[in-house]
Image: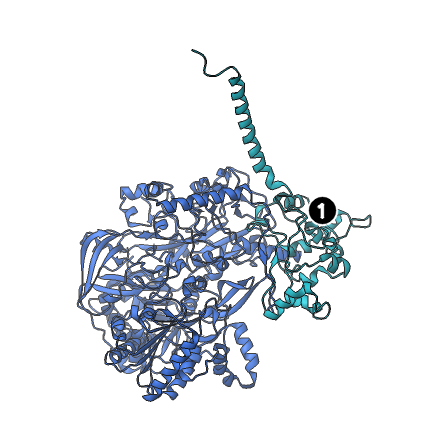
Chain colours: A cyan, B blue
């Protein structure tokens, strides 16, 4: 009686097994690596907003300080989003009929908040606090990028735990002088105090910043 | 056999119980065998998949909407937390609270240190009221005969009632309210009475306290209130007293009581005798707890009175009575006697006479005018209303803040004879279902009103949020009875106070809101003379061999908090029962009847009878059978409807009979959960005051053990806690505060029976000695934050770790749910999410504390020492470049505790906690395990009178 499988079947079976193993490995690799890609983290994705607010124009062009709108950044965990009222302090005077600003005027008229879409989000089990970072010499730019060059807001850092830990393990190179914290175009110059000096100036280093309880509650 | 035990079954060495208690996950087999329906299974699978999905990619999903306000709220920090004062109403009396807001919404109740009825403490019910505020079942809508109505219809209906009431000058118009202390409500009712001179106002609380009022009338001829100052009392005798649990002002009394209970901090420890039929909170903290049923009490009070007032020595008095009387007399001027509301008025009059004879007036206690707007005998008030309703003399009945259809037998029947009836209620009630109209009432946290505390201090209640559901204020409803224009509640409250304040109105209004009380409104002590015949009052001694006592549940109360899941799942102080109200009987009676916990008995009084399961309470008088009110509500919402048995029909005076019935009910009690094993069998260390005075280190038995592991190097702060067991009265305020602060879910009765309750903090209750009359000891138990933590070394994924400040931290995202840590924890304080309890909760997400992670299924959790509060303080201190202060962080349990049991702080900076830890009474729980807990206890010292046997 003839064999059911011809000799080539051995090869076919091996190939099938190998590709199965390969597929599983690739699958695991995908599962492991994909979330770490910038694509999955939505890095450099511009987010649609109800009003196309330009940080480039307001910060870079007009030179408005970050804290004019994000008022609680120095005192609270949350930097704060400007109430409609803040927008209208200027826009009740200039560009009063601009079509682009219709949702802002509508919000004030109807007393209904503007629904902004989040650009930077952290998981709910992480408690990032703006006040302490700003107080300790971390600039806005370190996480939010060169906002003054962004016509529309986008996320520029991955905001993964390893991104946070890179700085928490070795904060010194990421610190900047107090006057440069809200300057998104600041660059270290030869005159800048050394990282070690800044560490001492800001009293950073008193605690182990990589402890779980620093960020997780 | 352990010297201290928790459950009678354990004492009896019931083999089934022992197996159950010794198994680490005792109900696993039962859970596996339990039937799971297909839909339940699908739900679990879906949850599992969702969870798998989460671990797969939690990556930076864009999402979420940010909505800044249109106008910034004045005086608030964007995402900061703010405190706003208002009050919690307990049976009508105000307890000052402050609500903590996060991101603009109230999330936590804290006490108001300025308020005389709070002094910074709160009780369990006040803590849980924030859950009631967010209760979705409150959305009942304006209804007429269960059909939704428009508000315009209400205006029309009220106009018709005004006409009808005007016809007979209000003779057929009746208003039924709960106990009213609100000056504004009282003013509105007074105005109504001028419009309708013959209108009548009735008040009703199922827990009437009428006896207290009648006792004061007998003794003084007017309904005065006794205001104890327990910090001044050297000897306290409490007959079945509610002084520390529910008497108006109890939080203040508890604070003052506790000030004299720890001999290391007071020059002279007070001596407390509790004579009571069942353990009360005074009894739990007393030096001598003496068991006496209602019949015994009716004889004992006159005997003590004879001894104190006339120096007689009654022949048939128990041996301890003479010693007690001698003690009282020796402490003349510094002695105080108190009797609870369940005693007859004659006994209470005798207590007044004794207090006068003991000369403590002005130091240990004062007399004050009642805080109620109209002090009335509530039982009589209700009887009069029922008679009038039955006789057809009532054409319009307005029920405000009362649920008589459930709590007053005969009301539902009489209601059929009323032409027009209307209920105003915060949520569904039986009465709302029975009356013609249902008007939704604003919750006290979303409305303007005012109320008085026990001492008359007024608080203006301010809204903490916009109304969550479509509802109106009772002040508005009453204004519609007076005239066509509805009054806003703020206007109504201002109209009460502005005339009294004159020109200073704006400033005083602001101060009242900021401080939570209207300055100078406390009523001064009054000078009334004791009537001569008070000393001759003679309580009738009941001749029945069995006394059925109906008592309010400590947390659900008369049933009004029945839809509050935190309160339902709060273990009762002594029985540790949750979600149920079995009949409480003594061990001796259980033996006579041949019943054990859960066996049914039939209790009968007159025509009314109920078949109820029993629960055996060590330390209860054999004569007494106690049924708990507040359960068995049918129309209260998704949480409380159909929970327990309604025992209101058993109210009355007739003889009671009790017999064993067939069958059993499953009851959930946590008393045997989370067993701790110590070879010595001693968990709460205690000794007598004389032993302490002979050797202050009488409780010290720390073994000298070598460290097996290296100790952690000191960090920037060292967090530690000390728990003073002398002050604990078992009120459970800390437990609810912990649930509110830390987003702790409730799990339901079935899951509690599987030992899966999630409380991070529990109060263990131990018995010691004779089960008929045991010593009762309490011990708050929470994560001990061991410096050599057994949980940390067994975690395979380092989900539980030590930080440099001495905290044992739990990283939820690392946890894979092996439960090894819980196995290895000698204190059994870890809690595992067997299901997605948080997801299934009857509670919107916005009610949660945004500073605390909401834990998912399959994750272990436990007390964090309120890490979110530590982190907040740490950030403020780091910004200011200074160490965190010794007492800068106050944990939720510590803040809530009325008696200051907990002290917490940064031990690196000294402070109270360091002082308390140096107390000779300080000991570490299970020190022989060498875990070096950061939490230590101060052992119990009892100031016993050696002339009183045992």
Relative to B492, residue B703 above or below: above
Residue matched to label 1: A172
Residue lying farthest right? A190
Q: Which chain carries label 1?
A: A
Where's residue B907, x and y in %?
Answer: 56, 53
Looking at the rendering, which quadrant does residue B383 occupy?
Answer: bottom left
Residue lying farthest front? A2
Q: In which quarter of the image is the C terminus of chain B?
A: bottom left
Q: In this view, does B769 lie to the left or right of A149?
A: left
Does residue B682 appear in this view?
yes
Total marks shown come to: 1
Q: In this view, does B108 lie to the left or right of A139?
A: left
Relative to A90, residue B500 above or below: below
The residue nearer to you, when weighing B135 against B354, is B135
Callout 1: SS = helix
Residue shown at 57% from the left, 59% from the top = B888
Does residue B676 appear in this view?
no
Where's residue B804, x and y in %?
Answer: 58, 46
The residue nearer to you, when weighing B145 against B684, is B145
Q: Is residue A144 left or right of residue B485?
A: right
Q: How crowded is mark 1: few (under 14 residues within 10 Å), some or many (20 or more)?
A: many
Q: Is residue B452 left or right of residue B652?
A: right
Residue shown at 24% from the left, 70% from the top = B303
Where's residue B259, x and y in %?
Answer: 44, 64
Where's residue B385, x and y in %?
Answer: 28, 79
Q: Quadrant of the N terminus of chain B?
A: top left
Residue shown at 55% from the left, 34% from the top = A28
């Amino acid at each position: 009686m003839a064999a059911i499988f011809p000799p080539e079947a051995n090869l076919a079976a091996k190939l099938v097994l190998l590709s199965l193993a390969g597929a599983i490995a690739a699958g695991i690799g995908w599962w492991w690596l994909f979330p770490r890609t910038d694509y999955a983290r939505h890095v450099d994705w511009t987010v649609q907003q109800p009003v196309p607010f330009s940080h480039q124009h307001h910060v870079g062009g007009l030179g408005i300080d970050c804290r004019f709108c994000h008022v609680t950044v120095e005192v609270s965990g949350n930097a704060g989003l400007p109430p409609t009222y803040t927008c209208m302090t200027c826009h009740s005077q200039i560009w009063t009929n601009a079509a682009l600003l219709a949702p802002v005027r509508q919000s004030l008229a109807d007393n209904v908040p503007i629904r902004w879409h989040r650009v930077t989000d952290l998981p709910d089990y992480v408690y990032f606090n703006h006040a302490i970072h700003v107080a300790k010499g971390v600039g806005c730019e370190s996480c939010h990028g060169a906002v003054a060059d962004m016509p529309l807001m986008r996320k520029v850092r991955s905001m993964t735990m390893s991104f946070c830990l890179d700085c928490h393990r070795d904060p010194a190179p990421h610190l900047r002088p107090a006057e440069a914290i809200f300057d998104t175009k600041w660059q270290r110059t030869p005159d800048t105090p050394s990282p070690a000096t800044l560490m001492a100036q800001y009293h950073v280093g008193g605690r182990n910043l990589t402890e779980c309880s620093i960020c997780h509650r | 056999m352990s010297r201290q035990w928790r459950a009678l079954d354990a004492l009896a060495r019931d083999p089934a119980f022992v197996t159950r208690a010794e198994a680490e996950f005792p109900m696993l087999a039962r859970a596996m065998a339990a039937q799971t329906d297909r839909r339940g299974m699908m739900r679990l699978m879906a949850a599992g998949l969702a969870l798998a999905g989460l671990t797969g990619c939690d990556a930076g999903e864009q999402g979420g909407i940010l909505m800044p306000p249109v106008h910034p709220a004045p005086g608030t920090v964007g995402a900061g937390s703010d405190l706003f004062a208002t009050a919690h109403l307990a049976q009508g009396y105000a307890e000052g609270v402050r609500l903590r807001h996060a991101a603009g919404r109230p999330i936590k109740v804290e006490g108001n240190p300025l308020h005389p009825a709070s002094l910074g403490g709160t009780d369990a019910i006040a803590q849980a009221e924030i859950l009631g505020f967010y209760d979705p079942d409150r959305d009942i809508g304006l209804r007429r005969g269960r059909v939704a109505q428009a508000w315009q219809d209400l205006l029309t209906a009220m106009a018709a009632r005004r006409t009808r009431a005007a016809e007979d000058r209000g003779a057929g118009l009746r208003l039924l309210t709960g106990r009213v202390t609100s000056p504004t409500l009282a003013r509105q009712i007074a105005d109504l009475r001028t419009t309708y001179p013959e209108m009548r106002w009735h008040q009703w609380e199922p827990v009437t306290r009428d006896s207290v009022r009648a006792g004061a009338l007998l003794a003084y001829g007017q309904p005065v209130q006794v205001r104890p100052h327990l910090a001044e009392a050297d000897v306290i005798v409490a007959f079945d007293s509610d002084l520390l649990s529910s008497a108006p002002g109890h939080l203040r009394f508890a604070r003052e009581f506790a000030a004299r209970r720890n001999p290391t901090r007071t020059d002279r420890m007070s001596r407390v005798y509790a004579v009571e039929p069942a353990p009360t909170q005074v009894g739990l903290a007393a030096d001598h707890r003496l068991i006496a049923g209602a019949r015994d009490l009716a004889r004992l009070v006159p005997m003590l009175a004879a001894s104190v007032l006339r120096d007689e020595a009654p022949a048939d008095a128990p041996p301890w009575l003479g010693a007690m009387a001698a003690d009282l007399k020796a402490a003349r001027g510094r002695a105080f006697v108190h009797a609870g509301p369940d005693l007859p008025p004659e006994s209470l009059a005798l207590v007044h006479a004794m207090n006068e004879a003991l000369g403590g007036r002005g130091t240990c206690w004062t007399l004050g005018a009642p805080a109620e707007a109209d002090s009335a005998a509530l039982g009589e008030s209700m009887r009069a209303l029922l008679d009038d309703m039955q006789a057809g003399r009532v054409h319009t009945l307005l029920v405000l803040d009362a649920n008589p259809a459930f709590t007053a037998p005969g009301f539902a029947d009489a209601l059929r004879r009323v032409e027009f009836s209307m209920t105003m209620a915060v949520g569904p009630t039986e009465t709302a279902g029975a009356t013609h109209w249902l008007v939704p009432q604003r919750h006290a946290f979303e409305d303007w009103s005012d109320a008085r505390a026990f001492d008359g201090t007024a608080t203006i209640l301010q809204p903490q949020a916009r109304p969550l559901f479509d509802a109106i204020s009772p002040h508005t409803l009453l204004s519609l009875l007076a005239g066509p224009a509805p009054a806003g509640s703020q206007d109504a409250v201002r109209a009460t106070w502005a005339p009294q304040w004159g020109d200073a109105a704006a400033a005083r209004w602001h101060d009242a809101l900021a401080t939570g009380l209207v300055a100078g409104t406390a009523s001064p002590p009054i000078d009334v003379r004791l009537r001569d015949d008070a000393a001759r009052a003679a309580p009738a001694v009941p001749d029945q061999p069995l006394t059925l006592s109906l008592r309010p549940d400590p947390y659900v109360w008369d049933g009004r908090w029945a839809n509050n899941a935190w309160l339902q799942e709060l273990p009762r102080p002594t029985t540790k029962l949750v979600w149920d109200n079995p009949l409480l009987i003594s061990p001796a009676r259980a033996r006579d009847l041949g019943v054990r916990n859960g066996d049914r008995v039939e209790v009968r009084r007159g025509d009314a009878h109920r078949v109820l399961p029993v629960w055996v309470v060590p330390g209860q008088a054999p004569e007494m059978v106690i049924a708990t009110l507040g359960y068995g509500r049918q129309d209260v919402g998704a949480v409380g409807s159909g929970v327990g048995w309604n025992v209101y029909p058993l109210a009355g005076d007739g003889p009671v009979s009790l017999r064993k019935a067939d069958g059993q009910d499953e009851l959930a009690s946590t008393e045997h959960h989370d067993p701790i094993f110590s070879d010595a069998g001693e968990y709460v260390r205690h000794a007598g005051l004389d032993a302490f005075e002979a050797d202050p280190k009488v409780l010290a038995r720390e073994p000298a053990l070598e460290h097996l592991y290296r100790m952690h190097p000191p960090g920037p702060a060292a967090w530690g806690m000390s728990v003073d067991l002398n002050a604990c009265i078992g009120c459970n305020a800390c437990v609810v505060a912990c649930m509110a602060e830390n987003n702790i879910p409730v799990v339901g009765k079935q899951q509690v029976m599987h030992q899966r309750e999630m409380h991070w903090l529990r109060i263990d209750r131990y018995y010691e000695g004779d089960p008929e009359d045991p010593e009762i000891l309490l011990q708050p138990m929470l994560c001990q934050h061991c410096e050599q933590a057994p949980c940390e070394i067994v975690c395979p994924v380092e989900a539980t770790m030590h930080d440099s400040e001495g905290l044992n931290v739990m990283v939820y995202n690392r946890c894979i749910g092996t439960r090894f840590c819980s196995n290895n924890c000698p204190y059994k304080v870890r809690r595992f999410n067997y299901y997605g309890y948080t997801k299934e909760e009857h509670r919107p997400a916005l009610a949660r504390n945004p500073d605390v992670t909401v834990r998912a299924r399959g994750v272990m959790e436990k007390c964090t020492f309120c890490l979110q509060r530590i982190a907040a303080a740490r950030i403020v201190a780091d910004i200011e470049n200074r160490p965190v202060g010794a007492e800068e962080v106050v944990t939720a349990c510590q803040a809530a505790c009325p008696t200051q049991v907990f002290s917490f702080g940064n031990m690196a900076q000294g402070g109270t906690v360091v002082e308390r830890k140096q107390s000779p009474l300080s000991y570490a729980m299970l020190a022989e395990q060498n875990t070096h807990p950061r939490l230590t206890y101060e052992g119990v010292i009892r100031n016993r009178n050696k002339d009183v046997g045992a």
